[in-house]
Image (cartoon, rainbow, N blue to C red):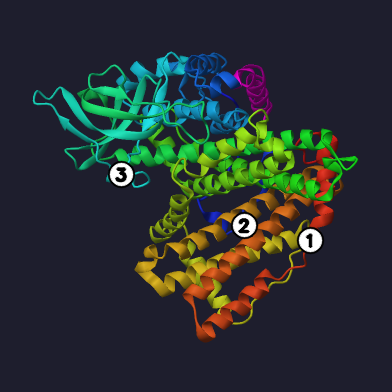
Amino acid sequence: MATVAIPPKTKLVGGSFLIEEHRLEDVFTVEDLSEEHQQIAQTTREFAQNEILPNVEKIEHKDFAVTRALLRKACEIGIANVDIPEEYGGSEMDKISSSIIAEHLSVSGSFSVSFGGHTGIGTLPIVYFGTKEQKAKYLPKLATGEWIAAYALSESTSASDAMNARTKAVLSADGKEWVLNGEKMWITNGGFADVYIIFAKVDGEKFSAFIVEKTFPGFQAGAEEKKLGIRGSSTTPIILNDCRVPKDNLLGEIGKGHVIAFNTLNIGRFKLGAGVIGGARYSLQNAIGYAKQRKAFGKTLADFGLIKEKLANMAAGIYVGESMSYRTIGMIDAALSDIDKNDPNVYKLTAKGIEEYAVECSVLKVWGSEMLDYVVDETVQIYGGYGFVEEYPAERAYRDSRVNRIFEGTNEINRMLIIDRLMKRAMGGQLALMPAIKKLTEEIMSGPGSVEPLEGALAAERTMVANAKKATLMLAGAAVQKYMTGLAEQQEILAAIADMVIETFAMDSVVLRTQKLIARDGEAKCQVAIAMAQVGLTQAMDKIEAAAKKVVAAVSEGDMLRTQLVILRRLFKHEPFNVIALTRQIADRLIDAGKFVIS
């Protein structure tokens, strides 16, 4: 059954958070979830608690029969086929629901990865780009879990450089089949999937996608990889040795495989961003529980200031991450709400609608995966020696987390994509980035510029966000001016600017969410949320300032360098929050509740 979403009504321009203020009514937050969304979250939590957690040990020991059975159960209750149309047996929910499910299934990294490989990157290419015949043949079986899907893009010699794939496809002499030769690597669900989306170059030149069944002649799944983490998921190479694929199993158009690959990865990124937030929340809950019962020096760990500081910083990261995740998925759902479902190109339009927010999806993936790494690392630290032991949940979460910085394009690749996408949108007239940079430059050159605090709720916090945007635009403009078309080769500079963009989106999102909370509940009831926002802002501003100094020293010198440093000092100047008092306040509330809460 399709859910009734309550997304923002305004279709926002992707990347526009950098150059304009979004209205509160256009920002979707966790608190805006409908009753239907809450029910989906509850159903998913119960499935995770009652079905996944009791089977974790079997999953971790690669009992793929258990994984398949769980995927089938998830299909039966409608949470593993949310992106499949009802006409093909799916529950066809909105993207907010899809994100909620990814978030609440993340109690097991291994199962979460298997789930995402099937429901997301394995199935969505057929949903969005398949012909009617392909959808009718494959989607009903994928919707019930009778068949499991996988996605095969990476190769040992290309990895992140997907367009450099060596796997080759040629049409047979009789014109009835494609003959595929090559090897794919690190394929999730590779050992037990039934149908694979495989990318190959037609005649060694035209990058294309194919639907390949495991029973096709010449197809073989290799041995299971022995991995650092997500050990319970299947990860294998796929060997194609004159693999015979029916001509009609070409997915999309010849030479347009990159459209399928990159749009699918955009979806994977926002789902991964949601999933890591759920994983962080689960680790925090374990850390709180352990800190409350473990005693040292006559007190529980939860009584110590340094432990409280860790718990509070973890919670602040989750609060910021939630703000970014739901804002992003809200924008996506708002954009998709305008699409006529009777349009014959509805699914291609859906993929294009998601592509509008490719910058935000990459931001969410990078920030979320690195936030989760921090949370699981501190969880191990709180557990101490027990955190290093497999019997306790901290150890597995720590190992499982690491792959998220590699999945769906490495974080390095995604940092490059953030800037590349922003610049392409600016050059194409889709984002008024260059006029904003020009206006800011003129403002700066005409004088020191005003950095007077704003008025109203969270005035100081909103001023910090505004100044972070100015600093990011200023240095992006300076980098473009110095290197022009050669900027693409300056990866260190691009990565530092990307970090500024990422942290600016984090700051902007958490302040907007907190503003909405205050408007709804009043400031007195939002003290914990405000404290989390202030801790998050402090951490983000420190990162932005460090990145800004790195960039300005690389793009300027002499008088210009000194001038820009003066401007940056003015922009970064703010009265510091008392983070010690704030983290104690946050931690006390968490410890009392025994879990992540914001009020």
Residue 480 in the image: above or below residue 298: below
Instruction: Check disc 2 and report the residue beneath it.
Output: 21
Where disc 1 sits, the SS reads: loop
Q: Residue at x 68, y 23 (%)?
A: 42
Where disc 2 sits, the SS reads: loop
Residues under labels 1 and 3: Cα distance? 49 Å
Instruction: Check disc 3 and report the residue beneath it.
Output: 157
Task: Give the numbered dot on residue 577.
Answer: 1
Q: Nearer the viewer, residue 195 or 510?
A: 195
Q: Residue at x 77, y 34 (%)?
A: 290
Is residue 38 a member of the stretch shown in magenta?
yes
Judge the density around disc 1: few (<14), some (14-19), many (≥20) Cα neighbours within 10 Å: few
Q: Which three-letter amino acid code belongs to the residue tagged 2? A: Glu
**Tag 1 near tag 2, CB within 8 Å:** no
Asked if one can make out residue 236 in the rendered structure from this viewpoint, the answer is yes
Q: Which three-letter amino acid code belongs to the residue tagged 1? A: Phe
| Main SS class of the magenta portion in the image | helix
Residue 163 in the image: above or below residue 113: below
